[in-house]
Image (tube, rainbow, N blue to C red):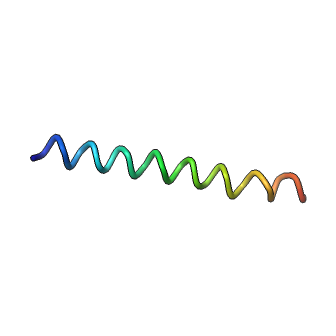
C-alpha cells in the first residue's frame, strides 16, 4: 500500500512539474 501511495505522489509531482513548464512556456514567449 505504501508503494502505491509513493507512486501516486511521484506521478503527481511529475504532472505538477509538467504543467508548470507548460504554463511558464507561453509566459516566456510573451515576455
Q: Residue at x 80, y 56 (%)?
A: 26
Q: Residue at x 65, y 49 (%)?
A: 21
Figure label count: 0
Residue 20 percent location from the top left of the image? 61, 54
- Establish if 19 lies above or below 7: below
Q: Residue at x 89, y 59 (%)?
A: 30
Residue 1 percent location from the top left of the image? 9, 47
Q: Residue at x 39, y 52 (%)?
A: 12
Residue furthest to the left in view is: 1
Q: Is residue 10 left or right of residue 19?
A: left
Q: Is residue 16 left or right of residue 7?
A: right
Residue 5 percent location from the top left of the image? 20, 49
Q: Quadrant of the C terminus?
A: bottom right
Q: Is residue 25 left or right of residue 30?
A: left
Amino acid at each position: 500500500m505504501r508503494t502505491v501511495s509513493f507512486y501516486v505522489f511521484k506521478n503527481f509531482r511529475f504532472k505538477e512539474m509538467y504543467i508548470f513548464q507548460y504554463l511558464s512556456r507561453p509566459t516566456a514567449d510573451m515576455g
